[in-house]
Amino acid sequence: METTIQISKELLGKLAVMKMHEKESYENVIWDLIEDRMEFSEQTKINIAKSAEEIKQGKTISLEEIKRKTCKR
């Protein structure tokens, strides 16, 4: 059974950019995204959640800061 979903124009634009070719359906793009997400191991999911929390808490540093620190050596 087919159905229609509502998405923002911004999301539609992002999905359009993800198409491998012009005639690829949005359904295929979404399936590819789902498959990619399902491939994450449980440990990877834990690590991603931990990293997201560290970012929220401000416990990270920028790439520019890392470059400055490593270039001083």
Image (cartoon, grey):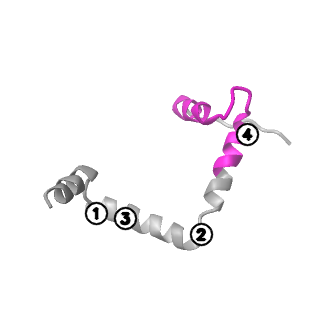
Say what secondary structure mark 3 lies in. helix
In the image, residue 63 lies at what x, y percent? 28, 52
- For disc 2, the marked residue is 41
The nearer-to-camera label among 2 and 1 is: 2
Q: Quadrant of residue 3?
A: top right
The nearer-to-camera label among 3 and 2 is: 2
Say what secondary structure mark 1 lies in. loop
**Res. 57 mark:** 1
The span picked out in magenta is 9-33
The question of residue 17 being in magenta is answered with: yes
Q: CA distance from mark 3 to mark 2?
A: 19 Å
N-term-proximal mark, 4 vs 1? 4
- Could you say which is closer to the camera, residue 48 or residue 5? 48
Query: Residue sitting at 23 percent across and 53 percent down?
Result: 67
In the image, residue 55 lies at what x, y percent? 33, 60
Query: Residue sitting at 39 percent across and 61 percent down?
Result: 52
The nearer-to-camera label among 2 and 4 is: 2
Tell me the crowding category of disc 3: few under 14, some 14 to 19, or many 20 or more residues within 10 angstroms, Cα based. few
**Res. 27 mark:** 4
The question of residue 15 being in magenta is answered with: yes
In the rendered structure, the answer to whether residue 54 lies left or right of residue 73 reads: right
Tell me the crowding category of disc 4: few under 14, some 14 to 19, or many 20 or more residues within 10 angstroms, Cα based. few
N-term-proximal mark, 3 vs 4? 4
Residue farthest along the right direction in this orientation: 1
- For disc 3, the marked residue is 53
Q: Amino acid at mark 1?
A: Gln
Q: Amino acid at mark 3?
A: Glu
In the image, residue 69 lies at what x, y percent? 17, 59
Say what secondary structure mark 2 lies in. loop
